């Protein structure tokens, strides 16, 4: 059974700091991995999608890497801002799932202090 | 539409009441997913549609949960005889189809059963 773990569960940093969020998964047979952001009381906003054949994806201050063989992904946020405060979720789309249904971690709650 | 739209945003139901939650996916998106997110947890898969066909309902927690997508566009998740443990955020996602595509989520419906 595929399990996704995110560490740390919560993180508080001062504004301007670079930070790394970690995601690990137990079964390396995945189609892709997706990082999402969730603001309180809101839905999920897609940040980055990494296909299983890719090593990383970048969007602005965000960079996500994927090491499928070791079952790990990291989300790097450069020069953090208070507006980055949210819960970050990673999810994998695994083989055998219904055409792409996602298995999620519990998320990392990020707080960036001004 | 421009994004995935869900209604209502909030629903309070008395225990035993039936509820219906609506999802309007991105126009042209073939695949539609329902997820349930308990407080402090990641979303968990409920069911999957490809066009109007419900291809996977393995995540539905009981036979009180029923979903439909009769014309391959709008979907409704119905919960009969609601119970307190049904309290959660219900999220809908759509994709263009296939296992490697990006999932786009709605804002969710927060259901509280009292």
Image (cartoon, coloured by chain):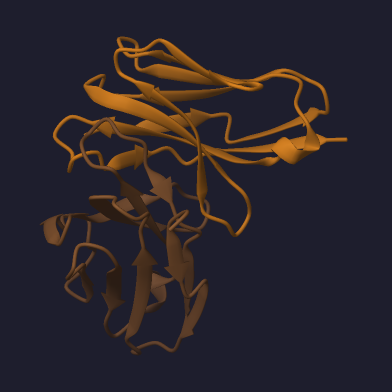
| Residue at the outermost right position | A114
Residue B84: which quarter of the image? bottom left
Q: What residue sits 18% from the left and 40% below the top?
A: A99
Q: In front: B83, or A112?
A: A112
Chain shown in brown: B
In the image, residue A44 sits, relative to residue A114, either above or below, namely below
Colour displayed for chain A in the image of the structure: orange
Q: What residue sits 22% from the left and 76% below the top?
A: B64
Asked if residue B114 shows in the view, the reply is no
Residue A9: which quarter of the image? top right
- Residue B40 at x, y percent in the picture: 52, 51
Q: In front: B103, or A69?
A: B103
- Residue A39 at x, y percent in the picture: 62, 50
- Residue A51 at x, y percent in the picture: 33, 21
In the image, residue A72 sits, relative to residue A102, either above or below, namely above
Q: What residue sits 41% from the left and 15% below the top?
A: A66
A73 sits left or right of A114 in the view: left
Asked if residue B34 shows in the view, the reply is yes
Count of numbered labels shown in the rendering: 0
- The quadrant of the rendering that contains the C terminus of chain A is top right
- Residue A45 at x, y percent in the picture: 52, 44
In the image, residue B88 sits, relative to residue B93, either above or below, namely below
Q: What residue sits 26% from the left and 63% below the top?
A: B73
Residue B70: which quarter of the image? bottom left
A7 sits left or right of B70 in the view: right
């Amino acid at each position: 059974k595929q399990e996704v773990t995110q560490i740390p569960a919560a993180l508080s940093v001062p504004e301007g700091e670079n930070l790394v969020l970690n995601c690990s998964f137990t079964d390396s047979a995945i189609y892709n991995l997706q990082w999402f952001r969730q603001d309180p009381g809101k839905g999920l906003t897609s940040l980055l999608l990494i296909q299983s054949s890719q090593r990383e994806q970048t969007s602005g201050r965000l960079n996500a890497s994927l090491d499928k063989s070791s079952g790990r992904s990291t989300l790097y946020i450069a020069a953090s801002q208070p507006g980055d405060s949210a819960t970050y979720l990673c999810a994998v789309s695994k083989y055998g799932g219904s055409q792409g249904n996602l298995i999620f971690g519990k998320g990392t709650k990020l707080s960036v202090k001004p | 539409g421009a994004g995935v739209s869900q209604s209502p945003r909030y629903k309070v139901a008395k225990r035993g009441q039936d509820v219906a939650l609506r999802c309007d996916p991105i126009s042209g998106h073939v695949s539609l997913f329902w997820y349930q997110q308990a407080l402090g947890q990641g979303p968990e898969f409920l069911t999957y549609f490809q066009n109007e066909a419900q291809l996977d309902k393995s995540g539905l927690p009981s036979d009180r949960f029923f979903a439909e997508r009769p014309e391959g566009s709008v979907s409704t998740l119905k919960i009969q005889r609601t119970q307190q443990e049904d309290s959660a955020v219900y999220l809908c996602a759509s994709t263009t189809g296939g296992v490697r595509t990006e999932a786009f989520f709605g804002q969710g419906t927060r259901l509280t059963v009292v």
